[in-house]
């Protein structure tokens, strides 16, 4: 099967790599696990998995929660 999906790409420091709404998750038959920062989805030959980096996600979350404390610091991806 093939689906045409339009995505919006942004340059942002975020704890999330992607944001899939419920309709897209249902279309892809995707299952997400927030505690594991993982998304599983069906491919023609196997179950695909994407995983986030919990340490980087935590750093980005803290930067977003307390933006005044990290002024002048580089983002974890650039450090």
Image (spheres, grey):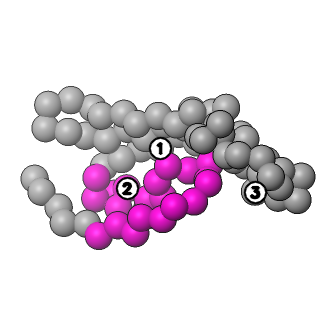
Mark in front: 2 vs 3:
3
What number is the disc on residue 9?
none
Residue 38 visible to the viewer = yes
Q: Which residues are magenta?
A: 6-28
Instruction: Find disc 1 in the rendering and name its residue.
Output: 32
Rate crowding at label 2 as few (under 14), some (14 to 19) or many (20 or more) other CA atoms within 10 Å: some
Residue located 36% across and 47% down the image: 30
- Between 8 and 24, the one lying in front of the other is 8
How far apart are the alpha carbons under marks 3 and 1? 22 Å
Q: Is residue 31 left or right of residue 73?
A: left
How far apart are the alpha carbons under marks 2 and 3? 26 Å
Please say if the residues under marks 2 and 3 sit with CB atoms less than 8 Å apart: no
Instruction: Find disc 3 in the rendering and name its residue.
Output: 64
How far apart are the alpha carbons under marks 2 and 1? 9 Å
Q: Quadrant of residue 43?
A: top left
Q: Position of residue 15 (x, y in %)?
A: 62, 48
Under tag 2, what secondary structure? helix
State whether residue 1 is above or below residue 8. Answer: above
Residue located 21% across and 29% down the image: 46
Rate crowding at label 3 as few (under 14), some (14 to 19) or many (20 or more) other CA atoms within 10 Å: some
């Amino acid at each position: 099967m093939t689906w045409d999906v339009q995505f919006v790409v942004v340059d942002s420091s975020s704890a999330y790599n992607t944001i899939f709404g419920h309709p897209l998750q249902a279309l892809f038959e995707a299952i997400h696990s927030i505690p594991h920062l993982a998304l599983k989805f069906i491919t023609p030959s196997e179950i695909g998995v994407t995983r986030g980096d919990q340490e980087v996600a935590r750093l980005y979350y803290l930067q977003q929660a307390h933006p005044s404390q990290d002024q002048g610091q580089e983002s974890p991806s650039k450090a």
